[in-house]
Image (cartoon, rainbow, N blue to C red):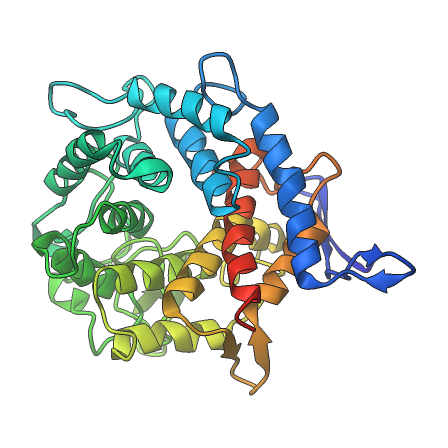
Amino acid sequence: MNAKWIRTAASAWVLVLAIGIPAATGAGNPASPKEQAKAAMDKAVAFLKAQQKPDGSIGAKPHVGITSLAIAALVEAGAKESAKEVIEKAVAFILASQQKEGPDKGAIFDPKMGYANYNTSVAIMALVAVDKEKYKDAIAAARDYEIGIQRTDGAYNGAIGYGSNKENPDLSNLAFAVLALHDAGVGADADVMKRAAEFISRVQNRAESNDMARFKMKTKDGTDIVPGADGGMGYSVGDSKSGLTANPDGTKSPIAYAGMTYQGLLAFLYAGVNKDDPRVQGAMNWIKANWTLDENAGLRGEKPEAALQGLFYYYRAFAKALDAYGEVAITDKDGKKHLWARELVSKLSSLQKEDGSWANAADRWQEGDATLVTSYALHALGIANRWLDKE
């Protein structure tokens, strides 16, 4: 198996990125993508089932969000029946965390751990995936909570942050909320979705539809922040986890990266922005210009190790966004056609550990947690497996 080694003295870790040579089956014959996907999913399902604790949570510690992501992944991978007992216990754990009163009424999370929006959003997705009708009351209460914490002010109009205090609004939190609201049956014509699309537009590097300039945002040293022109997306209005890039006119613009661009594309589509809309096509142009599954494109900067941060979050967003976009192949900027589901199955299969799990040595955003990362990867595989049948 070919490998690319990335080393940094500062972080003192070594990570292997496999190119993804298909495993052999039978008399030296390469496994088909479907066989690869099934083998990887079977191992991942077994791993996640084994992570359940007596209280019903899945993972090293009780966590609504990680448990919910695991459930959604199990269902997406076709394990709803084979993991029935695990899922039922996990759902009971999730429902026990729903807040009955106070400012967080309807939210599904542990107040001691925080992150009410993130946990509630993925809990909605999990409950809908398992049985939307059976859990309709819990879903409705959580949905109403999500709608109630959307901001309706200034540059952050349409954003959703970490919880009821509405602080730290960003595209990741908003996208999870939009996905949850979509799954809960909120239509694209709802005000919450229209406002969400406005915020996403303000995060996108596309001056024609990004009006952030009127809010006169500046860096700490007083430099004007303006949208870039590549169609990609950063983390929030005038902000990116990859930093800002200097423009010839002395202004600066957020650097787009894959995790947020795919997540933003997905949120656009779920919020009712048409596939042919220039904003959606702008995001697709960035994707075509930065096509890779070897890293979270755009995060590298001057730190090679940063390229792998958030890698599995990216893989899940990649699968969900392209599933929503609805095309079996994507042609990159050089005219090369990519069967994205096949490429994703190959990459994830090559990175899977013997015990069926995945983990990211670039441990940012909790990606050192094998349960979380395996949930991301399994969900992505389940989506890709469906698309293999369409090739």
Q: Is residue 326 left or right of residue 160?
A: right
- Seen as rendered, the residue at the extreme top is 54
Q: Is residue 350 left or right of residue 372?
A: right
Image quadrant containing the N terminus:
bottom right
* Number of numbered discs: 0
User: Percent position (x, y) of residue 44?
Assistant: 62, 39
Please state which of residues 378 and 335 is positioned toward the viewer in this rendering: 378
Confirm whether residue 20 shows in the render.
yes
Q: Nearer the viewer, residue 347 or 125?
A: 125
> In the displayed structure, would residue 177 be above or below residue 242?
above
Q: Is residue 268 left or right of residue 103?
A: right
Query: In the image, what residue occupies the spot 48% across and 29% down?
Result: 84
Residue in the picture at 81% in, 60% down? 2
For the C terminus, the image quarter is bottom right
Residue 176: % across, % down: 31, 46
Residue at screen point 57% across, 39% down: 374
